[in-house]
């Protein structure tokens, strides 16, 4: 099994060398059944069979069990590997002792993880010289940045902000393409300045969200400019003019990116993978919708709303399941696609107040429960739909997607007042407290080697888990703006609310003109002048009528006594 990707430089090298070598071709054709897997199209197979990087090659028996595996393998090594696997398997010795040097950590089981434990681990591995976590390769840690900024906004502790800002500054200086915009996927070196040149939609969507959040929390103009460059890259390079969705990635063509700027202008652009992945588009939609809190205009918002309309049509047309690729039908289906869409619909609802969007978010939760629930708590990463007739893949519960789901459930519980959502969030998070921080999943050992390596390097899953846990325990900040949506003061209160919004803030806009019964049922006066109510749990501040009074409560640490 060759695990490869269109954006992967060393995958292309292996195609041109090892897989083009006549000796390799003859050995494979004579003794093996070759299978080629695009890891973006089949993240479930990648999670179970990657060998710690891309490209990966895995040798499986008829039951799907791994006999041997490696990452990039040069032609001569590949010939020896094929011969050794063939010899060992034909002699009936079973497992072949030839594996990637990167192995899973089966000893990371813990008990009772806490946000403080995750924060302590992040502080321990923080690179005080260049920002980010660990040494090299250096990955953009957007989940960790958002945890640090969320904690800083809650407590006002300056070191949290400093770690986040040093990381954001380092990435913008080294990974952002200063000519064409957009972030490269990661840096080979600790100082961020030797990038791997592929540009991924999901990387740019998540980093756009991180820089938008940083702009709101710190007020720094540079983060606003970086967010603009990232969003505009997506619009100019990755946007499909027909569907309005975004393409998956732009290739790592090193020769192109190393050209002087004037020569790049005259050269063909790096090639693009035009696949339209629903989950990654939902991440993009969230970024465009969140931009209203920084820019205050509807230009970017409209892009996000249109993406989600298209994705809803995909969901509705596919028996209440989100296909992995737009326009496809049938499985497998992935938890990540549903969770990213759920979170995007919640973002859309909070900006617009449109109850249809809230209903769609709740219907996605129902689908997650129906198709991904694990009997022992948490949610599986995949639902395979109709059976393929082959061996079943082992069940895997990823920490990251479950944590992001839990965070969305906290928002839903806050908006609807349903304790059921909050209980479900708590149960979901508890299912992973024994493996956080340190492991990326619950399931059979020695899987998800790429994800396990990333978890040891910079804690993406643990950061998301800690963020959701901390917001659940401390309480989300619920900002309710009640007023005629056409009234000037209502608009100013909403604008001030979104300029203040961080991950722990949940915004709800209620128009007494359009829905007086809903306003009254939630305990608010339907006939009052435009008013903002700021609450945590059952504790609320006095009603707020002036945007300036609302903004002061957005300052870091201002609500610490209320949230506990």
Image: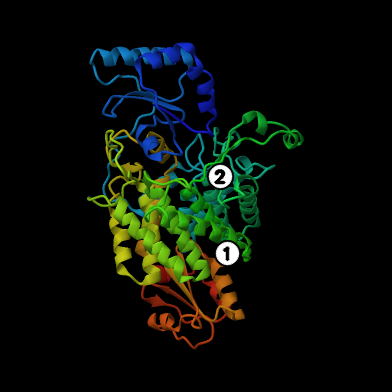
Mark 2 residue element: loop
Asked if the residue under mark 2 is in contact with the one under mark 1, i.e. CB atoms within 8 Å, the reply is no
Residue at image point 43% right, 25% down: 71
Answer whether residue 225 is visible to the viewer in this image: yes
Quarter of the image holding residue 16?
A: top right
Residue at image point 45% right, 15% down: 25
Quarter of the image holding residue 295?
A: bottom right
Residue at image point 29% right, 29% down: 64
Real-space CA distance between mark 1 and mark 2, rounded to the nearest whole angstrom: 25 Å
Name the residue furthest right.
262
Q: Where is residue 325? Give x, y as percent.
A: 46, 45
Q: Is residue 537 left or right of residue 349?
A: left
Check the image and tell me how it is coloured. rainbow
Q: Is residue 176 left or right of residue 131?
A: right
Q: Residues within 10 Å of mark 2 (few under 14, many from 20)?
A: many
Q: Is residue 356 above or below residue 318?
A: below
Q: Where is residue 257? Give x, y as percent.
A: 66, 33
Quarter of the image holding residue 51?
A: top left
Q: Where is residue 56? Give x, y as percent.
A: 43, 27
Number of marks drawn: 2
The mark closer to the camera, 1 or 2, is 2
**Residue position marked by numbered label 1 in the rendering:** 293
**Residue position marked by numbered label 2 in the rendering:** 247
Mark 1 residue element: helix
Which quarter of the rendering shows the C terminus? bottom left
Q: Is residue 73 above or below residue 276?
A: above
Q: Where is residue 120? Give x, y as percent.
A: 40, 48
Q: Residues within 10 Å of mark 1 (few under 14, many from 20)?
A: many
Q: Nearer the viewer, residue 459 or 154?
A: 459
Which quarter of the rendering shows the N terminus? top left
Q: Is residue 128 above or below residue 313?
A: above
Q: Is residue 244 left or right of residue 424?
A: right
């Amino acid at each position: 099994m060759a695990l490869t990707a269109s954006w992967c430089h060393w995958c292309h090298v292996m195609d041109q060398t090892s897989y083009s070598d006549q000796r390799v071709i003859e050995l494979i054709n004579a003794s093996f059944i070759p299978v080629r897997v695009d890891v973006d199209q089949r993240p479930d197979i990648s999670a179970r069979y990657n060998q710690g990087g891309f490209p990966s090659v895995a040798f499986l028996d008829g039951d799907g069990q791994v006999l041997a595996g490696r990452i990039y393998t040069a032609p001569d090594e590949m010939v020896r590997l094929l011969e050794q696997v063939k010899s060992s398997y034909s002699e009936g010795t079973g497992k072949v002792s030839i594996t990637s040097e990167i192995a899973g950590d089966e000893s990371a089981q813990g008990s009772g993880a806490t946000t403080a434990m995750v924060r302590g681990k992040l502080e321990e591995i923080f690179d005080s010289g260049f920002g980010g976590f660990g040494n090299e390769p250096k990955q953009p840690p957007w989940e960790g940045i958002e945890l640090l900024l969320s904690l800083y906004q809650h407590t006002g502790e300056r070191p949290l902000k400093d770690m986040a800002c040093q990381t954001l500054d380092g990435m913008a200086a080294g990974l952002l393409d200063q000519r064409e915009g957009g972030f490269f996927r990661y840096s080979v070196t600790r100082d961020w300045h030797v990038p791997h040149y592929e540009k991924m939609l999901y990387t740019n969507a998540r980093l756009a969200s991180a820089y938008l959040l940083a702009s709101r929390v710190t007020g720094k103009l540079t983060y606003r400019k970086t967010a603009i460059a990232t969003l505009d890259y997506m619009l100019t390079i990755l946007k499909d003019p027909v569907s309005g969705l975004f393409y998956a990635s732009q290739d790592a063509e090193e020769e192109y990116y190393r050209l002087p700027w004037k020569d790049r202008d005259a050269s063909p652009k790096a090639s693009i993978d035009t696949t339209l992945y629903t989950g990654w588009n939902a991440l993009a939609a969230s970024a465009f919708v969140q931009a209203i809190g920084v820019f205050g205009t509807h230009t970017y918002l409209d892009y996000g709303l249109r993406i989600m309309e298209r994705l809803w049509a995909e969901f509705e047309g596919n028996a209440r399941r989100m296909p992995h690729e737009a326009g496809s039908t049938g499985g497998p289906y992935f938890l990540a696609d549903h969770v990213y869409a759920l979170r995007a619909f919640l973002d859309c609802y909070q900006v617009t107040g449109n109850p249809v969007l809230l209903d769609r978010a709740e219907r996605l939760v129902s689908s997650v429960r129906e198709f991904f629930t694990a009997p022992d708590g948490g949610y599986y990463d995949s639902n395979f739909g109709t059976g393929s007739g082959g061996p079943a893949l082992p069940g895997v519960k990823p920490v990251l997607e479950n944590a992001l789901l839990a965070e969305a459930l906290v928002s839903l519980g806050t908006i609807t007042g349903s304790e059921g959502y909050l209980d479900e969030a708590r149960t979901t998070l508890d299912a992973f407290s024994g493996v956080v921080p340190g492991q990326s999943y619950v399931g059979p050992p020695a899987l998800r080697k790429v994800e396990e390596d990333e978890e040891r390097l910079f804690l993406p899953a643990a950061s998301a888990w800690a963020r959701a846990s901390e917001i659940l325990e401390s309480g989300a900040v619920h900002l309710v703006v009640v007023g005629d949506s056409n009234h000037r003061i209502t608009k100013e209160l909403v604008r001030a609310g979104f300029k203040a919004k961080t991950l722990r803030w949940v915004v709800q806009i209620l128009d007494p003109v359009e829905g007086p019964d809903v306003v009254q049922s939630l305990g608010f006066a339907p006939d009052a002048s435009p008013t903002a109510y700021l609450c945590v749990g059952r504790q609320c501040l006095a009603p707020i009528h002036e945007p300036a009074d609302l903004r002061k409560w957005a300052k870091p640490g201002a609500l610490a006594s209320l949230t506990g």
